[in-house]
């Protein structure tokens, strides 16, 4: 006991885990915090949409077509008499779920492939990395469009199409991390004590490379959200009547002179959401980088 | 140097082969053929069309024919633009996409580099913070959202600029700004970071201590060295400009390669899609190659190996 107290008095700063430390650093970063709060509020609003607005996203009222914003319709109505605010809220569900679910696919594919490639080295590594290089050379949006036309129109297939394109970056990152970690002393120690390949990968290599992966995932989310909005804007994203911000922009485009509010709100919503994720990602990167630790 | 380029070109050929193989496979997995119309065509007509375009042959033969055509610069026939070759269609759109891309690239560097440099030279000043904030904002807002906001301001509210089309210089302003926003922000960020790093180098201190005027130190020692990382990202940036034009061309109704390609996707025009994908992959790979060679040329520390 006494020994422990002595060590505590000697160390100048209180002991924190990596994550505790990162959280404290993140809390000091107001932009990142604002981003996180915005995302949480939006997610909450998207989940509670039926409680916030009395209108459904597909409810048409043909007596109230293309109305300007009012108390009854805070963001007006579109040319089919649908409440734009309700569509915006339900559209947030689409955007956020695309952002999050594609990352599951990215992790499920990218993490193991990168870890195997980095750990195995040699021919396996070479083969996997050449494949990854070819995937890199393939323009993202083109591949998504191609996959989109093969996989069909449902929103799950959209997750899959975007996820199948985005895993490459994460696998490269994990491979680099594993390569640099696997020659460290603590890994040699684990191996000297009889740890086997799988054990070392899962117990030592992956947890230690998690920081940069989390940061890259945070930056990947807005990219996926953007891809969905862009695809829906071109007309090959989610299918109507599923609300999507990109689709709202596309619908509002024809009315840009008559009813600009129909296009302004979703455009600003996309901009704010992407900005929030960028701020959060920047904050996380700063918080998780041990080199910046005091 | 020569060996390096040859190896990169061989690699490029391999990449393009795999890209066309993937595209070809995916296109033939798509349910529905190019002759699916709202009005059902008679089976005899479909057969005749398939025969005419070689779609009745086995898949490997179709793929072989396509590759043989590509080697000769023929990207196949378009099924939706009747009787026209894909090469011809894409070449018609290319100058427009290229003009947009080049102008956007020049604008991005002309804005991004000086901003990043000014920010670094006065670290923690108002200029610095402004540059960081603006580059973060423009790096995260997609071009087409920016385009819509600009359109509402300049076309709808102020009536200064046309909403789209091609022909007059006025119609270029908004699309070029939208395309340039992201690379400008990236250039500003990277220039700032690399200038800050170069400023701390020993040779800069040496240059100052031997009494060189500040301007000479900045131009000869800081400026030139801090541009090296900026060139590295120029390749991906150009590639982004090319694929970014997809959506921007649609938004501003510019009949460039991107818009033609999207039309092809809607019409299930296999020919146009395959040719288009290959065309894009080729353009991007070539740009990256040029940038790599350029990179090694301006930085003597880098060896071709």
Image (cartoon, coloured by chain):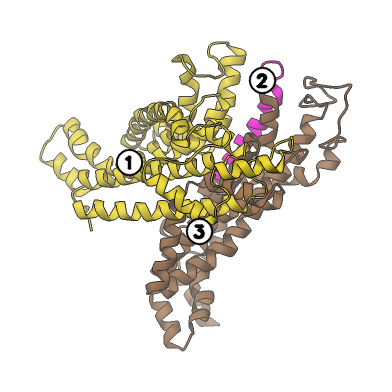
Query: Is residue B56 in the magenta section?
Result: no
Q: Chain of mark 2?
A: A
- Which residue is nearer to you in this view: A21 or A72? A72
Rendering colour (chain B): yellow
The residue shown at (41%, 45%) is B69
> Where B182 falls versus A124 (above or below)?
above
Secondary structure under tag 1 reads helix
Rendering colour (chain A): brown
Residue B257: x percent and y percent? 48, 32
Q: Within 10 Å of the Cα at label 1, are there few (<14), some (14-19), or many (20+) other Cα atoms?
A: many
Which badge, 3 or 2, is on the more N-terminal residue? 3
- Which residue is nearer to you in this view: B163 or A223? B163
Secondary structure under tag 3 reads helix
- Which residue is nearer to you in this view: A48 or B10? B10
The residues bearing labels 3 and 2 have C-alpha atoms spaced at a distance of 39 Å
Residue where numbered disc 1 is placed:
B230
Residue A56: x percent and y percent? 85, 37
> Where B166 falls versus A47 (above or below)?
above
Residue where numbered disc 3 is placed:
A170
Observer able to see residue A72? yes
Q: Chain of mark 3?
A: A
- Which residue is nearer to you in this view: A54 or A5? A54
Instruction: Point out the stretch of residues depicted in magenta.
Output: A255-279
Q: Chain of mark 1?
A: B
- B235 vs A22, left or right, is left
- B228 vs B204, left or right, is right
Query: Is residue A260 in the magenta section?
Result: yes
Residue B170: x percent and y percent? 47, 14
The residues bearing labels 1 and 3 have C-alpha atoms spaced at a distance of 24 Å
Residue where numbered disc 2 is placed:
A256
């Amino acid at each position: 006991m006494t020994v422990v107290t002595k060590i505590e008095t000697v160390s100048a700063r209180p002991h924190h885990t990596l994550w505790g430390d990162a959280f404290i650093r993140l809390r000091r970063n107001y932009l990142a915090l604002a981003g996180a709060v915005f995302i949480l509020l939006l997610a909450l609003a998207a989940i509670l949409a039926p409680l916030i607005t009395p209108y459904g996203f597909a409810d048409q009222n043909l007596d109230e077509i293309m109305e300007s914003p009012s108390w009854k319709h805070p963001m007006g109505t579109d040319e089919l008499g649908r409440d734009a605010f309700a569509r915006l809220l339900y559209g947030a569900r689409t955007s956020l779920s695309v952002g999050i679910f594609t990352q599951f696919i990215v992790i499920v594919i990218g993490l193991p492939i990168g870890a195997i490639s980095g750990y195995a080295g040699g021919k396996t590594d070479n083969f996997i990395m050449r494949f990854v290089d070819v995937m890199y050379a393939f323009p993202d949006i083109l591949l998504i469009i191609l996959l989109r036309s093969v996989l069909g129109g449902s929103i799950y297939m959209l997750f899959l199409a975007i996820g199948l394109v985005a895993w490459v970056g994460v696998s490269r990152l994990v491979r680099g991390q594993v390569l640099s970690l696997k020659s460290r002393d603590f890994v040699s120690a684990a191996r000297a004590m009889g740890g086997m390949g799988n054990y070392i990968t899962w117990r030592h290599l992956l947890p230690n490379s998690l920081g940069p992966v989390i940061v890259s995932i945070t930056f990947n989310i807005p990219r996926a959200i953007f891809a969905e909005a862009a695809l829906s804007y071109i007309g090959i994203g989610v299918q109507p009547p599923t609300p999507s911000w990109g689709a709202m922009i596309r619908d509002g485009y024809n009315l840009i002179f008559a009813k600009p509010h129909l296009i302004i709100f979703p455009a600003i919503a996309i901009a704010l959401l992407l900005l929030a994720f960028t701020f959060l990602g920047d904050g996380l990167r700063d918080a998780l980088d041990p080199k910046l630790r005091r | 140097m020569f060996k390096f380029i040859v190896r990169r070109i061989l690699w490029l050929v391999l990449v393009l082969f795999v890209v066309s193989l993937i595209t070809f496979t995916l296109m033939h997995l798509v349910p529905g053929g190019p002759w699916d119309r709202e009005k059902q065509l008679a089976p005899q007509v479909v057969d005749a069309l398939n025969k005419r375009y070689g779609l009745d042959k086995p898949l490997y033969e179709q793929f072989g024919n396509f590759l043989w055509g590509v080697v000769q610069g023929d990207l196949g026939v378009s099924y939706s633009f009747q009787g026209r070759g894909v090469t011809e269609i894409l070449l018609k759109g290319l100058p427009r996409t290229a003009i947009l891309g080049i102008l956007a690239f020049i604008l991005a560097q002309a804005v991004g580099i000086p901003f990043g440099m000014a920010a670094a030279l006065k670290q923690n000043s108002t200029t610095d913070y402004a540059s960081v904030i603006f580059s973060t904002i423009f790096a995260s807002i997609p071009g087409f959202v920016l385009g819509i906001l600009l359109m509402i301001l300049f076309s709808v509210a102020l009536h200064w600029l046309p909403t789209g089309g091609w022909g007059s210089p006025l119609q270029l302003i908004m699309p070029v700004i939208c395309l340039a926003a992201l690379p400008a922000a990236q250039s500003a960020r990277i220039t700032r970071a690399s200038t800050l790093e170069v400023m701390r180098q020993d040779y800069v201190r040496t240059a100052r201590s031997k009494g060189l005027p500040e301007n000479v130190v900045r131009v000869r020692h800081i400026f030139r060295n801090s541009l090296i990382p900026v060139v590295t990202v120029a390749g991906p940036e150009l590639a982004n400009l090319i694929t970014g034009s997809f959506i921007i061309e649609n938004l501003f109704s510019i009949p460039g390669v991107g818009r033609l390609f999207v039309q092809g996707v809607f019409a299930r025009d296999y020919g146009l899609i395959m040719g288009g994908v290959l065309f894009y992959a080729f353009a991007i790979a070539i740009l990256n190659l040029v940038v790599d060679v350029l990179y090694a040329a301006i930085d003597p520390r880098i060896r071709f190996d």
